[in-house]
Image (cartoon, rainbow, N blue to C red):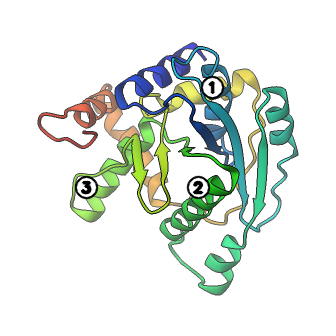
């Protein structure tokens, strides 16, 4: 947990993620990343230079089994208000549109629903659980499938909604998150999505693993490229 909190503090300092008086809503999917972020921000608010309010929200995509009771108990333990909102996203994607490559549309619909929920709950920041490896995988996916150098930004202001998306774990390796989740026995919910584990992102994760067998510090070098404002400006 010490390493994870250190990464969050560094990202907050570098990108100005949290300001005094913010209400930060953690988008909790039930996966390991969002649960680790929720728990870590619950600790970070104790010593963050800017005092902020922390809440959590989960979208139920309309596909079972998806039991959020354990997540609710965790939120009660760490004193974070928790909201679950029912949606029909799964039915739209799989039953109505019958998408064969559903991930992009699903992400867009989930993000829109989370933004609307933030406004309902009075939050001005939406915290997402993307970590260092997610940023690198997105970079490689954009390069190899779209022919461009692009990845998500640690802090993005959405002008139409007035909500700011933040990703406090962008410096954190996935292995640290896995360790924290196992150590704390956080209540991970298995995703009921039919595409879970069969996405291009999973393929890219394996490709990067293969690269790291030959170049052990490849992930660190890719992170350095993302941080290089002078030459690339991807996180400028």
Q: CA distance from mark 2 to mark 3?
A: 21 Å
Residues tagged 2 and 3 counted as in contact (Cβ below 8 A):
no
At a point 71% along the width and 21% down the height, the residue shown is 183
User: On the image, which quarter does residue 232 sit in?
Assistant: top left
- The answer to the question of whether label 1 and label 3 lie on touching residues, with beta carbons closer than 8 A, is no
The span from disc 1 to disc 3 (Cα, nearest Å) is: 32 Å
- What residue is drawn where x is 74% and y is 40%? 188
Q: Nearer the viewer, residue 141 or 155?
A: 155
Point out the image quarter for the C terminus: top left
Closest to the observer, 199 or 97: 97
Q: Secondary structure at mark 2?
A: loop
What number is the disc on residue 197?
A: 2
Please provide percent x and percent y for residue 92: 65, 79
Disc 3: which residue? 143
SS assignment at label 3 = helix
Label 3: how many Cα within 10 Å (few below 14, some 14–19, many 20+): some
Q: Residue furthest front?
A: 21
From this view, report whether residue 63 is shown above or below residue 67. Answer: below
Residue denoted by label 1: 40
At 54% from the left edge and 22% from the top edge, which residue is drawn? 4
Q: Percent x, y for residue 64?
A: 81, 64
Instruction: Give the mark, 2 or 3, whose residue is nearer the N terminus.
Output: 3
Q: How far apart, in angstroms, are the residues tagged by discs 2 and 1?
A: 26 Å
């Amino acid at each position: 947990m010490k390493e994870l909190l250190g990464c969050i503090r560094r990202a907050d300092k570098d990108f100005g993620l949290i300001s005094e008086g913010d209400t930060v809503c953690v988008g909790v999917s039930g996966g390991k990343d969002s649960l680790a972020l929720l728990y870590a921000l619950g600790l970070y608010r104790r010593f963050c230079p800017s005092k902020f309010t922390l809440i959590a929200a989960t979208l139920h995509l309309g596909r079972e089994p998806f039991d959020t009771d354990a997540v609710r108990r965790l939120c009660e333990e760490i004193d974070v208000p928790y909201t679950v909102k029912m949606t029909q996203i799964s039915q739209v994607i799989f039953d109505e549109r019958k998408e064969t490559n559903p991930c992009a549309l699903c992400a867009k619909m989930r993000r829109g629903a989370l933004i609307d929920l933030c406004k309902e709950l009075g939050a001005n920041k939406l915290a997402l659980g993307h970590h260092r490896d997610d940023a690198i995988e997105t970079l490689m996916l954009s390069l190899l499938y779209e022919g461009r150098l692009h990845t998500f930004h640690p802090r993005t202001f959405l002008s139409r909604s007035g909500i700011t998306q933040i990703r406090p774990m962008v410096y954190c390796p996935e292995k640290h998150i896995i360790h924290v989740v196992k150590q704390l026995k956080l209540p991970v919910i298995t995703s009921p999505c039919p595409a879970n584990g069969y996405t291009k992102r999973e393929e890219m994760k394996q490709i990067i693993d293969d690269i790291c067998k030959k170049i052990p510090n490849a992930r660190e070098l890719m992170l350095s490229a993302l941080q290089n404002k002078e030459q690339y400006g991807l996180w400028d």
